[in-house]
Image: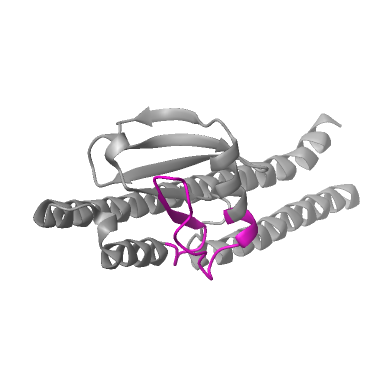
Amino acid sequence: MMKKIILKIVPLLITGIILFSSAYMFNLNKNQTYERVRLLKESQVQVIATQMDTIAAITKEPLNSDPVNRDMIIHSVESINEQSGVYCYLFNKDCELLSNFSKQQKHEVGEQIIKALKEQTPNVLVNHGFHGYITIDMPDQDMVVYWQGIPSGLRSECEYFIILAVNKQEVQTNEAIISCKIMIGMLTIMLCASLYCNIHHISNNKQKE
């Protein structure tokens, strides 16, 4: 009797272990993808800040004194938004939004981020004066936001602020991962069914003997 119970439970245990392990690996891959995207976009923001610092150092004039500089920053910030799940905006020192929403973005999420930045008291994670990290409360998650002041220096002297957030739920993983999930699910079901069929067949043969 005990042997029959064990034989019935073993396939379920094997199936559960496979599904749990694969789910863990896929979640780990998603987190790694999120971190790579976040760090990549932050580096792009820092490149923009470095370029603007160079222009400010050469011209010796405020960046907002030249409309070309403002348009250059806006275009650079908006280009960061091309990837799904990435939300990057340019504000002036009066907290007025200067850049536009990307076609790749869900406006609802973008508007929630901007609303949270303006209305919430953010939790400061890291503050280096003209750049750092904060967290904001979103309906589905707490989102980490990177902010960068331009030009670099004292925060009170920054003319623009770039705000960057990456939504982990929207970050696209490799399309091959989706195929792997389907294949693992199908193979797991087939394995479980095969084990039960073999157990049933062996049991029937023993009863006939």
Q: Is residue 69 visible?
A: yes
Instruction: Give, as a single range, the part of the protein colored magenta.
Output: 81-110
Q: Position of residue 105 (x, y in %)?
A: 55, 63
Q: Which quadrant holds residue 146?
A: top left
**Extreme left residue here?**
58
Q: Position of residue 153 (x, y in %)?
A: 22, 38
The residue nearer to you, when weighing 48 against 181, is 48
Q: Where 20 falls versus 98 (above or below)? A: above
- Name the side, left or right, on which 116 lies relative to 190: left
Residue that appears at 22% across and 55% down? 52
Q: Quadrant of the N terminus?
A: top right
The residue nearer to you, when weighing 116 against 45, is 116
**Extreme right residue here?**
208
The residue nearer to you, when weighing 16 against 60, is 60
Asked whether residue 83 is drawn in magenta, I would say yes
Magenta region, main secondary structure: loop
Asked whether residue 51 is drawn in magenta, I would say no
Residue that appears at 17% across and 53% down? 61
Q: Is residue 142 visible?
A: no
Residue that appears at 33% across and 54% down? 40
Q: Where 43 falls versus 81 (above or below)? A: above
The residue nearer to you, when weighing 37 against 101, is 101
Q: Position of residue 147 (x, y in %)?
A: 39, 43
